[in-house]
Image (cartoon, rainbow, N blue to C red):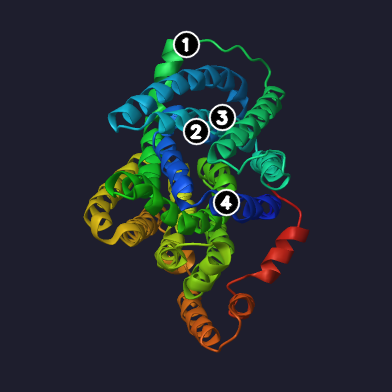
């Protein structure tokens, strides 16, 4: 399994690193700088709102379907036929609930207009993820790797043309940004649908009440888990926009730092895409997961630690480089969110293993506790500390959940902490903090210092054998025995 995991991970990460950082820092960041913090904050809070109810589109069926198909590929045709229709019905529910809540919260006509397209985008994006869950369930990881970047490639082309091509006679508007995303998602959704359809023996969508109730009942724990995770990850910007007099601006300032967190989290998320079906099949076949867990931990967490800690040290130069306004405040937000990054990333490893085992109800209870803690801390801290309060609430919540998941893995799989997290990791963290502070205080130009610190940290990781280069080469050249 190591070879299958590692070889497909290289392709998936390589494609995403080629495309998504440019989308986040080249396109999305430029849009915010062009339209300003107020207009972007207006969009960002609505975008986060549309994500909070995203679970109604999914009802847990994506992760549940991935787990089922990876264990029994023969179920693809009947399950795809049934679930496709169920997803369309769920989309109607999502739309009705979203706009009902929007009216209750008192959103303006302008906000409701933009929300129509954001709701459409969430539906299309969710549909793409559902199609991809079938593809990864069949272990067609190369096909999924291409699909994972297809929508962003189209968005880069379309938004880039409008941003820099001078095709309009007026300044760029945030609404155009949303419209062009709709076009991109729509095209990729159609392509992904036909890719899955080509793998099925038959496609006969019909509403089977017994099957529908079974799916809803069995996927409900997955739905609750996804909902609660989305709530404590995304609710900060919505609360900022709703609770403060200048809420749109505060949400925009928060978005400047949150964008970087989202970019770095992408790397960890890619691991979960491959690990969930692999862990599921290994657990079903009673194969030990400790070695794959440790290998994935080193490949995931060492780069995350390097990027997270280095960015904390260089947070002011980073924000000054990327943005035109509000950089002092957003730099401090960034420092707190980079602390949260470490625990969010660990969740994509340990939480994925627990999901593959079927411990979804336990994870949901943990996520519910995290959500309540996050809401309480935001309600207390946002009125007084604004964006800093929201970021601190996020850090505390993610830290609590991350540590709890590690403890749960230890109890469920009887894997010692030293096998999951080598002691050398703690030495490594201390070393990169010390070297980073020395380089930062040396007077070296910030961007050069950032690169030098990253290079030194990578060297240290190899030196103390946290990046297993020899093992990686052996895996790549060996024959797959699975």
Q: Position of residue 242 (x, y in %)?
A: 31, 43
Closer to the eye: label 3 or 4 = 4
The reply, left or right, for residue 464 in relation to residue 336 is right
Q: Are marks 3 and 4 in contact (CB under 8 Å)?
A: no
Disc 3 or 2, which lies upstream in sequence?
Answer: 2
Disc 1 or 3, which lies upstream in sequence?
Answer: 3
Label 1 packing within 10 angstroms: few (<14), some (14-19), many (20+): few
Residue found at the very far bottom of the displayed protein: 442
| Circle 4 SS class | helix
- The residue sitting at 29% across, 33% down in the picture is 105
Disc 2 or 1, which lies upstream in sequence?
Answer: 2
The residue labelled by disc 2 is: 118
The residue labelled by disc 4 is: 34
Q: Position of residue 207 (x, y in %)?
A: 49, 11
Depth check: 456 or 42 in front?
A: 42
Q: What whole-number distance in Å separates the C-alpha atoms at marks 2 and 1?
A: 30 Å
Depth check: 166 or 371 in front?
A: 166
The residue labelled by disc 3 is: 124
| Circle 2 SS class | helix
The residue labelled by disc 1 is: 208
Closer to the eye: label 1 or 3 = 3
């Amino acid at each position: 399994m190591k070879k299958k995991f590692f070889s497909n991970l290289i392709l998936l990460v390589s494609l995403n690193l080629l495309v998504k950082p440019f989308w986040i820092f080249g396109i999305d960041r430029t849009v915010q700088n062009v339209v300003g913090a107020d207009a972007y904050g207006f969009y960002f809070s609505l975008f986060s709102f549309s994500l909070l109810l995203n679970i109604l589109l999914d009802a847990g069926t994506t992760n549940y379907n991935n787990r089922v198909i990876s264990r029994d590929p023969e179920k693809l045709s009947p399950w795809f036929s049934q679930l496709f229709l169920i997803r369309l019905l769920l989309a109607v529910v999502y739309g009705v609930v979203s706009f009902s809540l929007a009216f209750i919260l008192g959103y303006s006509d302008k906000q409701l207009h933009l929300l129509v397209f954001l709701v459409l985008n969430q539906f299309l994006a969710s549909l793409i993820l559902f199609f991809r869950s079938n593809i990864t369930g069949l272990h067609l990881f190369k096909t999924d790797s291409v699909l994972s970047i297809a929508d962003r490639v189209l968005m880069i082309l379309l938004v880039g043309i409008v941003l820099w091509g001078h095709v309009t006679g007026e300044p760029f508007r945030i609404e155009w940004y949303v419209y062009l995303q709709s076009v991109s998602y729509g095209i990729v959704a159609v392509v992904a649908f036909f890719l899955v359809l080509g793998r099925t023996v038959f496609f006969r969508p019909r509403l089977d009440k017994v099957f529908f109730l079974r799916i809803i009942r069995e996927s409900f724990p997955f739905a609750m888990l996804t909902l609660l995770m989305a709530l404590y990850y995304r609710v900060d910007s919505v609360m900022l926009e709703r609770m403060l007099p200048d809420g749109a601006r505060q949400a925009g300032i928060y978005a400047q730092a949150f964008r970087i967190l989202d970019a770095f989290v992408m790397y960890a998320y890619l691991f979960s895409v491959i690990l969930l079906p692999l862990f599921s099949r290994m657990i079903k076949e009673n194969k030990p997961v400790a070695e794959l867990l440790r290998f994935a931990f080193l490949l995931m967490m060492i780069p995350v630690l390097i990027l997270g800690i280095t960015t904390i040290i260089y947070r002011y130069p980073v924000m000054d480089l990327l943005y035109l306004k509000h950089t002092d405040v957003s730099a401090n937000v960034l420092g707190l969110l980079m602390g949260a990054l470490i625990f969010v990333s660990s969740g994509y490893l340990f939480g994925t293993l627990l999901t593959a085992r079927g411990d979804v109800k336990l994870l949901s209870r943990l996520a519910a506790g995290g959500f309540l803690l996050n809401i309480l801390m935001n309600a207390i801290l946002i009125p007084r500390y604004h964006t800093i309060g929201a970021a601190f609430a996020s850090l505390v919540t993610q830290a609590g959940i991350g540590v709890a998941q590690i403890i749960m893995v230890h109890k469920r799989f009887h894997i010692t902490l030293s096998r999951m997290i080598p002691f050398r990791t703690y030495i490594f963290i201390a070393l990169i903090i010390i070297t980073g502070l020395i380089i930062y205080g040396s007077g070296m130009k910030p961007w050069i210092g950032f690169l030098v610190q990253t290079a030194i940290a990578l060297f240290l990781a190899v030196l103390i054998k946290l990046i297993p280069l020899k093992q990686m080469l052996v895996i790549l050249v060996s024959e797959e025995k699975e």
